[in-house]
Image (cartoon, helix red, strand yellow):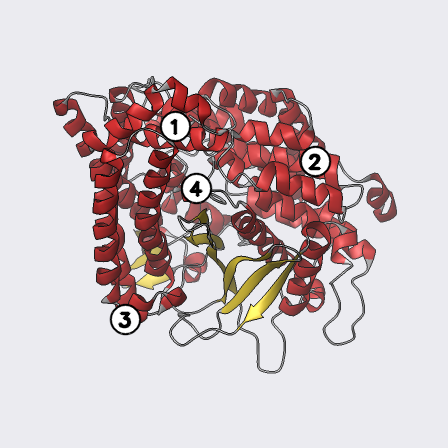
């Protein structure tokens, strides 16, 4: 069966696995309600969470990645059913009472270790978000709002990807071939950001981002419903609710972080925009005003002109085998961990090119499994991501339930007889995703509810972004980057130039991210919103980003991150700031420092989400941090490396 789960040798097995989980959960609910308050209460809650997550997490992966439609459909159904049960349990008053008795008992609470206390509070938080503390009428309203929000999220997400159509006669004949023809219409499915023709990019921008009343109504209802739910359960705004338990803690800190960052970036971003404008004027003297559709294209042109980075020159040095060797060698030096390929059993994997790796520590033995689903195939989503299939936890019999994860990439299939060659971007993505996987393997918590990457959103990206710093360091790259034909190492100046090229227009790129994050905060801030979402977009774009708003466009209707990262889009910037500080202070001097590797494991990876994120960061950096420290870390990353700069000049 899939992942070695015997029931899942066929799609119908999902029904069986689901029924088993539901039976188990019913028994655990009864047990929780009849157990006197103590550490065992938290254990039972975690078992309950585990029995449902073991099916739901696995189904979450299968529904997007399995090549067989019947499997995908069965997994989708299982996700829905388990979701409904979770919603029910989150509003089960009797179940909540058993946890409340524990939290109210000061003597027992004081006798619990910090992790157990935090897990108990996190479970309580899940109850309160569902309105358990309200009277029956309001509780029903909370449940209905939760269901409605889920539907709106799915509808909005679908709407963000739907192409727009336009009568082909509207566009000049010489650019029509860039778009897919459907009878008398042309289909515009994206921004064509890399197209050298200014007119094509302009047309794509104006058509793809054209406002759509249905999608607008969905977004407005989604934001209003999130706000109603947050207020119903006792928060000022949805952002206040979403930021509980994060590194930032509240919207005020996020606002401060974004404002200070924007202030520090504005002069640099302005310079970047001026360089892009010059380049545009040089290539297109008739129309030199820089517009939003120009930013990605001209920053790429400047990068290419200044550093002439041809990915094709790098690929031969980054064969997949060499990159995996590099990761293995890095983990072994830093953490005493090795990756071993394992034989899979029949029916365990969903595509024959999936590889299973055992993660083994030199003294602690087997830590868990990583399934590598690296190659493109029809119907597989084009995204790089990490899925937890089974969380680690300490079982009742004293054994440890080993974590299982999947790393999904979209690498091209290589021709027969030649290895798979990765571009520098793909290599960095592989390191990034492997950072998540190591977090899952080493976040060996007692409780499944806070294992591995089950932690605050603004902390979750730290281990993965930190791996990008390793992937861009010559000492690390030099250990594995060899030409697959000649065995020659990748020259040092090629690595330095690659790193420097990433800094071209990086301030403008970061300013764009700040704009998205600010927009997300305003949308999830105080309601009713003072203006329409489009007017807010226009105002914020002109104030924070600096390039003009284009009339009749509504970029926010394509902002798919509003679904998964509502009020938390800033997380990526904050995680990058922490990763940067950890890299500079702990690894920049010696990226293979075992003592630092052990400290990193002990302070940051080992706790999963079982410890307050800011305490983990302070433990690693051995100091407390201010908002300014975060901002400085991001801004100092934009400075050019003097040595490379001089060599190149």
* Label annotation for residue 10: 3
Residue 279 in the image, given as x and y percentages of width and height: 66, 43
Q: CA distance from mark 2 to mark 1?
A: 40 Å
Query: Is 366 left, or right, of 554 in this rendering?
Result: right
Q: Is 485 rendered above or below residue 70? A: below
Q: Which of disc 1 and disc 2 is earlier in sequence?
A: 1
Secondary structure type for disc 4: loop
Contact (CB < 8 A) between labels 3 and 4? no
Q: Which of disc 4 and disc 3 is earlier in sequence?
A: 3
User: Dot 3, how many residues are within 10 Å of its Cα: few (below 14), some (14-19), or many (20+)?
Assistant: some
User: Dot 4, how many residues are within 10 Å of its Cα: few (below 14), some (14-19), or many (20+)?
Assistant: many
* Label annotation for residue 638: 2
Q: Residue furthest bottom?
A: 417
* Label annotation for residue 447: 4
Q: CA distance from mark 1 to mark 4?
A: 13 Å
Residue 337 in the image, given as x and y percentages of width and height: 65, 56
Q: Which of disc 1 and disc 3 is earlier in sequence?
A: 3
Q: Which residue is mark 1?
A: 121
Secondary structure type for disc 3: loop
In what quadrant of the picture does the N terminus appear?
bottom left
Q: CA distance from mark 3 to mark 1?
A: 39 Å
User: Of the residues tagged 2 and 1, which is closer to the observer?
Assistant: 1
């Amino acid at each position: 069966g899939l992942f070695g789960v015997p029931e899942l040798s066929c799609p119908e097995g999902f029904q069986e696995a689901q029924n088993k989980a539901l039976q188990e959960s019913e028994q655990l609910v009864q047990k929780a309600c009849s157990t006197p308050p103590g550490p065992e209460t938290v254990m039972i809650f975690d078992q309950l969470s585990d029995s449902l997550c073991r099916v739901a997490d696995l189904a979450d992966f299968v529904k997007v990645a399995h090549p067989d439609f019947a499997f995908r459909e069965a997994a989708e159904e299982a996700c829905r059913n388990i979701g409904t049960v979770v919603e029910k349990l989150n509003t089960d008053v009797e179940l909540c009472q058993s946890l409340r008795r524990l939290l109210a008992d000061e003597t027992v609470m004081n006798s619990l270790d910090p992790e157990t206390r935090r897990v108990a509070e996190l479970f309580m938080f899940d109850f309160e978000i569902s309105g358990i503390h309200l009277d029956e009428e309001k509780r029903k309203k909370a449940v209905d709002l939760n269901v409605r929000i889920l539907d709106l999220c799915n509808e909005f997400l679908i709407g963000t990807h739907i192409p727009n159509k336009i009568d082909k006669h509207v566009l000049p004949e010489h650019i029509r071939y860039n778009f897919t023809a459907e009878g008398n219409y042309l289909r515009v499915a994206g921004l064509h950001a890399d197209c050298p023709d200014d007119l094509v990019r302009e047309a794509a921008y104006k058509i793809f981002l054209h406002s759509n009343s249905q999608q607008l109504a969905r977004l407005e209802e989604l934001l209003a419903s999130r706000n109603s739910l947050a207020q119903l359960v006792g928060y000022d705004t949805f952002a206040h609710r979403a930021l509980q338990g994060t590194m930032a803690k509240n919207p005020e800190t996020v606002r401060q972080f974004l404002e200070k960052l924007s202030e520090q970036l504005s002069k640099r971003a302005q310079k970047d925009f001026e360089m892009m404008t010059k380049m545009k004027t040089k290539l297109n003297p008739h129309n030199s005003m820089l517009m939003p559709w120009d930013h990605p294209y001209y920053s790429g042109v400047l990068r290419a002109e200044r550093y002439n980075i041809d990915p094709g020159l790098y690929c031969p040095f980054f064969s997949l085998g060499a990159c995996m060797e590099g990761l293995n060698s890095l983990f072994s030096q830093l953490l005493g961990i090795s990756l071993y390929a394992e034989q899979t059993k029949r029916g365990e994997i969903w595509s024959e090119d999936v590889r299973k790796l055992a993660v083994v520590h030199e003294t602690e033995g087997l830590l868990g499994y990583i399934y590598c689903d690296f190659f493109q195939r029809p119907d597989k989503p084009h995204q790089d991501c990490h899925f937890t299939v089974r969380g680690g936890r300490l079982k009742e019999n004293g054994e440890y339930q080993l974590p299982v994860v999947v790393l999904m990439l979209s690498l091209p299939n290589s021709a027969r007889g030649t290895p798979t060659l990765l571009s520098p971007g793909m290599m960095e993505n592989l390191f990034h995703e492997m950072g998540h996987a190591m977090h899952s393997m080493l976040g060996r918590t007692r409780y499944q509810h806070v294992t591995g990457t089950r932690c605050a959103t603004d902390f979750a990206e730290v281990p993965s972004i930190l791996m990008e710093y390793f992937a861009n360091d010559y000492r690390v790259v030099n250990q594995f980057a060899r030409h697959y034909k000649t065995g020659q190492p990748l020259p040092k100046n090629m690595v330095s130039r690659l790193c420097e090229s990433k800094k071209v227009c990086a301030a403008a790129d970061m300013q764009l991210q700040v704009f998205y994050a600010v927009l997300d905060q305003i949308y999830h801030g105080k309601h009713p919103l003072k203006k329409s979402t489009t007017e807010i977009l226009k105002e914020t774009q002109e104030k924070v980003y600096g390039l003009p708003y284009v009339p009749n466009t509504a970029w926010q209707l394509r902002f798919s991150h509003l679904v998964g990262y509502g009020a938390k889009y800033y997380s990526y910037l904050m995680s990058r700031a922490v990763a940067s500080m950890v890299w500079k202070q702990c690894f920049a001097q010696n990226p293979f420092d075992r003592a630092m590797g052990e400290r990193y494991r002990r302070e940051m990876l080992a706790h999963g989400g079982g410890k307050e994120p800011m305490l983990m960061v302070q433990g690693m950096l051995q100091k407390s941090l201010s908002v300014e420290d975060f901002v400085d870390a991001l801004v100092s990353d934009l400075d050019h490396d003097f040595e490379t700069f001089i060599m190149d000049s």
